[in-house]
Amino acid sequence: MILAAIPMAFAQDEPVKIPDWIRNNAGWWSNGQISDSDFLTGIQYLMEQGIMVVPKTEITQQVALPSVPGWIRDTAGWWAAGQVTDEDFVNGISWLVEHGIINVGNTTDRKIPAYEIEGNHYPIYQFQITPQSPDCDDTHLHASSGYTIDAVLVSFTDPHPGECGLGTVDSLVLNQIPMNENQIRQWEKASGIIIAEE
């Protein structure tokens, strides 16, 4: 696991200015009137416009987060009501970047090899590849469960644990699936497996 501090920087020519519509969205979001996705799209806008600059960072925690934590939603609501400062609000946004929930500057897709099993794609790094054996005439895969490219745990039963497992390597479809750095981070957090840079 790589530990690093997340530096937060702002446009240096002037103090941070956050458009009023983001404040409105923060209030609506804290009340459940708009989705996490819609709100985070607005935050992404701030970053793309250079109002908030967050350098590329390393993950500081290897945890799978099912959604945006409640304390960030609460802070956004308080900020919308004028009860906390812009800095308090931005600290919450920094936390989202640090934990890979908001993706900043990492939009380039990488091709990740993944086996297609029962309609889902599973990065290859989580499977045990077993060579030819008396029970199976070809190199084959074994695993008891796996994470899809969306970092969703899908448990499946190894159909032939004493034989060819999930199938021979030649019989399975291997695709190169585009994943951006945010998707890769989420998968790594969920699976506990780090995908090395090529």
Image (spheres, rainbow, N blue to C red):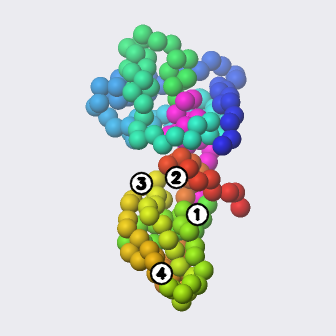
Which residue is located at x 58 percent, y 76 percent?
Answer: 130
Asked if the residues shown at circle 1 and circle 2 are in contact, with their CB atoms under 8 angstroms apart, the answer is: yes
Asked if the residues shown at circle 1 and circle 3 are in contact, with their CB atoms under 8 angstroms apart, the answer is: no
In the rendered image, which residue does mark 1 sit on? 125
In the rendered image, which residue does mark 4 sit on? 164
- The amino acid type found where label 1 is placed reads Tyr
Q: Quadrant of residue 60?
A: top right
Q: Tell me the quadrant of the picture where the N terminus can be found.
A: top right
- The amino acid type found where label 4 is placed reads Cys
Q: How far, Cα to Cα, is label 1 from label 2? A: 10 Å
Q: Nearer the viewer, mark 4 or mark 3?
A: 4
Q: Tell me the quadrant of the picture where the C terminus can be found.
A: bottom right
Task: Give above or below for 7 relative to 152.
Answer: above
Badge 2 or badge 4: first in the primary sequence: 4
Q: Position of residue 142 (x, y in %)?
A: 50, 71
The one nearer the camera, 145 or 177, is 145
Answer few, some or many: residues within 10 Å of disc 2's Cα (few below 14, many 20 plus, some between 14 and 19): many
| Residue at the limit of the structure toward the bottom, as seen here | 137
